[in-house]
Amino acid sequence: MARPTSTVMRTSTLSFATLISLLILPAHAAPVADSERVPVDLRRTTLVVQDLEASLALYRDAIGMKVVYDNMVRTPREAKTNEEADSAIRLVFLQANDTFVGILGLMEYEKPVKAPPEQMPQPFEPGSIVLLFNTADLDARFAKISAVPGVKVLSEPRDTFYPSYDGKGRIPARVSVLVDPDGHVVEYNQLMMDPAQMLK
């Protein structure tokens, strides 16, 4: 029996998104040579969330990122409590294995409390985002990640491959796709080869 068109399209979209993520991965985690530098660094992606503790249960406790910043940002800045403030935001930064780039920010409005959107963009549709994490132990961690309250599994771990940079070989990967409690798409993947060999 043929799969429904929507299922085929979603599988195709997931595969394409993973391919793009793999193709922009550097051969190793290091700054580019001075001669190849561009005049900008993408330092942080910040997600506005409804419940910051629920987000930390995923990104800190299950995925394994490290909290490096956790503060209240109040306006006016002199306000010591939320009661004294006109607005109050809790802001958290998490890092993986780089102290300067690749930081994930989580932001929750505590005053005034922000109502959830009436409708989030559907995964892999215009307006949605995809966060991609690479790990060395996908299968060992997936059960814990998928069990976090509010997390929805779109695709359980599966093996696939993509064309290599020169188009002659393959880049093997194990891929999973989830949606976090606020509707952001998360790819949690494992490269099945040495990243240093990807550009060769």
Image (cartoon, rainbow, N blue to C red):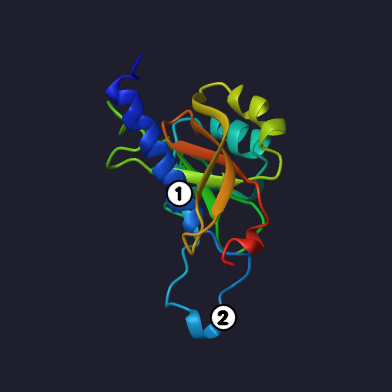
Q: Is residue 154 left or right of residue 125?
A: right
**Residue shown at 40% from the left, 32% from the top:** 11
Callout 1 crowding tier (Cα within 10 Å): few <14, some 14–19, many ≥20: some
**Would residue 97 appear left or right of 44 to someone viewing this image?**
right
Work out which residue is located at the far front of the displayed protein and give it. 168
At label 2, counting other C-alpha atoms closer than 10 Å, the crowd grade (few under 14, some 14-19, many 20 or more) is few
The residue under the point 40% across, 44% down is 16
Name the quadrant containing residue 160.
top right
Q: Would residue 113 be visible to someone looking at this image?
A: no
Q: Position of residue 157 (x, y in %)?
A: 58, 31
**Alpha-carbon span between mark 2 and mark 1:** 25 Å
Q: Amino acid at mark 1?
A: Leu
Taking depth in this image into account, of 93 and 137 the one nearest to the observer is: 137
Residue 158 - label: none
Q: Which mark is drawn over residue 19?
A: 1
**77 versus 152 height, above or below:** below
Residue 178, given in percent of the width and then of the height, sits at 50, 31
Q: Disc 2 marks which amino acid? A: Ala
Q: Is residue 127 left or right of residue 173?
A: left
Q: Which secondary structure lies at badge 1?
A: helix
Quadrant the C terminus occupies: bottom right
Q: What residue is at 56 percent from the left and 75 percent from the top?
A: 32
Mark nearer the N terminus (2 vs 1): 1
The total number of labels drawn is 2
Between 121 and 99, the one nearer to me in the picture = 121
Q: Are marks 2 and 1 in contact (CB under 8 Å)?
A: no
SS of the residue under disc 2: loop
Q: Which residue is mark 2?
A: 33
The image shows residue 61, relative to residue 17, as above or below, that is above
Quadrant including the N terminus: top left
